[in-house]
Amino acid sequence: MLNVRETGVNFIERKFAEYYAETLEPVSPLSSFTQREFGFIPFTEKIMIRHKGFTAPEELMAFITSITPAHAYYSAAYYEDPEAPMAKKGWLGSDLIFDIDSDHIQTPCKSEHDYWICADCNTGTTQPSQGNCPHCGSGKLRSEFWLCETCLELAKAEILKLLDFLIADFGFQQREIKTCFSGHRGYHVHVDVEEVKSLDQTARKEIVDYLLGTGLNIEFHGLKKTHRTAEWLSMGPTLSDSGWRGRIAKGVYDFLLSATLQQLEDLEGLTKPAARRVVKNRDRILEGGGRSAPWGIVKGVGPKTLEILAMNGAKKQASMIDPVVTMDIHRLIRIPRSLHGKTGLKVVTIPFNSLEKFDPLKEAVAFPEGRLDVYATEAPVFRLGNEVFGPYQHERVELPMAAGIYLLCKRAAKDARRPS
Amino acid sequence: MTSMLLSPPDLAKYPFTKESRDYIKGLDLKVDELVDPDFGEALNRAEQRVEEALLGGEVKWGGERYYEIEVLSYPVAIMLVASIDDDFLVRRYALAEAKRAYSLFRGERDPERLLEIAGSAFDWRAEDLASDASQSYDYALHFVDYLRNASRIRSDPWKLVNRLVINGMVFLKKDEFARLLSEEVRKHVHSTITSSPKINLPPQLLQRIARITQILTERRENMRREELPEKTMAAAYPPCIKKLYDALLTGRHLSHVGRFSLTSFLLNVGVDTEELIRVYTSVSDFDERLTRYQTEHIAGKKGSGTKYLPPNCDTLKTHGLCPRPDEVCRMIRHPLSYYRTKARLIRREHADAERA
């Protein structure tokens, strides 16, 4: 039975403990299990328990159930001695990992669901009063992310671009790539292939730059300037090209297909008359003059304009990964099927073919049963499973367990059964 | 990979290949035997290899010799370099062997040959595209092998993002393939030397060691003089230093790191401590006593006695002190390297202008 004195955190912790007790194997099989480092953040303190090593998944499982962490991680790296201090671990290699976080993507909806927590009185708010906490007036607000369909969809679109890079350009097989929903605001991609393990940071940075299009120079992709535009364009990248060449062509093509005059004028360096000429001759440019597009020769649309279009096209084709994660050869990442302490959602491994229709707000639900009575302080509209909730403003609501736990984790609600 | 049959001259050309290593191992050479008159020629050639590296920066192809001597001289040269145990010499020798290999690679007519060497010596995963006439590339190399060697080369065309990459393979021209392969040779030679066990050379060889050490010392002195212009060349300052210097002259605030970078840079390119203190104190309200103390400290005249070097490019970037990298910046990682490189370019330009 419920202990009425139980705090919100105690309650979440107990639910997490139940989840781990019922989940026999929270960890997807990891290669070289014994060479990995594990780390955990408990509910009680904010300090990570690091440098843990386990001899078998069962041992890890026993540890997790004994401490019930709010967050659980394992290293992408392999070590001779995972339990040794960092400098003495003996680095053997690291998987290639990518993180796409909707925090790093500019989404139009951010202003609608940005959310802050006050460091002093611990209250959540969607409407700070002049940058201060509306409850206690403190200035120490830190922003929080609300699960948002739009943001997560955009993150997924970046993942799909990333996977195309990894398969078409880098030649990885589908089965070598594992994609996970992080349980919060983004996705992780994990490439566990022998040959990439020894790559150093400099080499990983080159991969990062490749994916982000950093340092890309169109001269090396068929657009090396000559005096005659016609000659220049006859060498230009086409839609059927592979690698970045094809991506530049696709980026230009996709953009031109639907670009408004305003969008063209907004491109840095493009003059208004040039933008108008592009719009006026849109079809001819897209047709590509008999080539596989999109470099149709149009009077008045010269190398400068085309270069701006090409660079813009490239930008749209890049995959917005977080460079720091990929370059970090000691990175800890969330254990598949573990719970995310900020949402109560689980880390879900997504089968390759179901990625496009994957619905994180449904498939990551870890507590599908029961209901919870909470006092919601402030929360925007959000969806979980098939139901839409909120907005709430200082009201008592009875919610499905997952939604209730989500609000508790977000510190946007209190357990209503607990006398305050 | 099918095993190749390297002809004896090939073993001599590419002494770092597995076949050559096996051949050398088969001779079961002992250090003490080196003084045997039979090895005189090989010893001479070994010493010459190191000399060529120090003087010309490239070991020459000794193909006119008996191939056994040429093959044998390689491990002996490595032994000589290893026993001197000097970082500069090790780097220089590895680079010189790589340059030798590069010229030889470029001279190979049969495209399969480079592929075989890359595969057997370094386990490269590569394909030969030369037979496909529709290809404008000669080789396709696995991206991991590519990155292992190209990520050190800091110039636009070598960035992976500027390469054609399909299905894990990076497309390359023959010359580029040879360049990367020679980079692998450089690393291989370098690690062979640094990982070779310390051995006591027979006393008869000490004379040779002394001769090499002599050249090494002279060479290092020369390079130092050659590399840093005698008179400070303000035109060769990198953009970051120029910006800091301008800020100083116009009396703007310099952060601690900014001031340290500027001071240590200027002192290293030969600006006089007194002169620098004068500049600092004349353009702003710097306390002369403190400025003098700090400047002399950085110059190594106070405190620990070490002369400080300015931070490298990465650190400057982290501190937001790298304003706008230019062409030369892309080739270097340290403001002093920028200065050396730029000074050389400027001198060359002047020389060309005079000749014209």
Image (spheres, coloured by chain):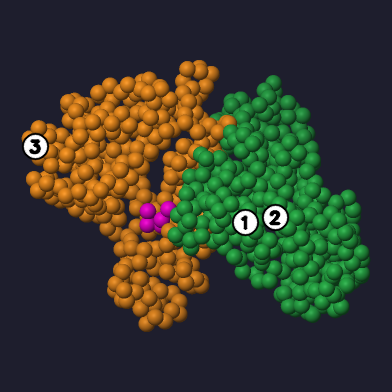
Q: Secondary structure at mark 2?
A: loop
The percent position of residue B265, horizontal first and vertical second, equals 38, 63
Which chain appears orange?
B
Left/right placement of residue B170 relative to residue A298 reads left
Provide the chain ID for the residue under circle 3: B
The quadrant the C terminus of chain B occupies is top left
Number of the label disc, if any, that sits on residue A338: 2
Q: Residues within 10 Å of mark 1 (few under 14, many from 20)?
A: some
The percent position of residue A382, horizontal first and vertical second, equals 85, 57
Contact flag, marks 1 and 3 (Cβ < 8 Å) = no
Which chain appears green?
A
Residue drawn at x 18%, y 36% as measured from the top left: B29
Left/right placement of residue B160 relative to residue A102 reads left
Nearer the viewer's eye, disc 2 or disc 3?
2
Q: Could you say which is closer to the camera, residue A190 or residue A207?
A: A190
- Mark 2 vs mark 1, CA separation in Å: 12 Å
The percent position of residue A9, horizontal first and vertical second, equals 76, 70
Residue drawn at x 79%, y 80% as measured from the top left: A136
Q: Quadrant of residue A276?
A: top right
Amino acid, disc 3: Asp
Left/right placement of residue A324 relative to residue B43 reads right
- Mark 2 vs mark 3, CA separation in Å: 70 Å
Residue drawn at x 26%, y 54% as measured from the top left: B224
Residue B187 higher or lower than B12, as above or below = below
Amino acid, disc 1: Leu
| Residue designated by label 1 | A60
| Residue designated by label 3 | B36
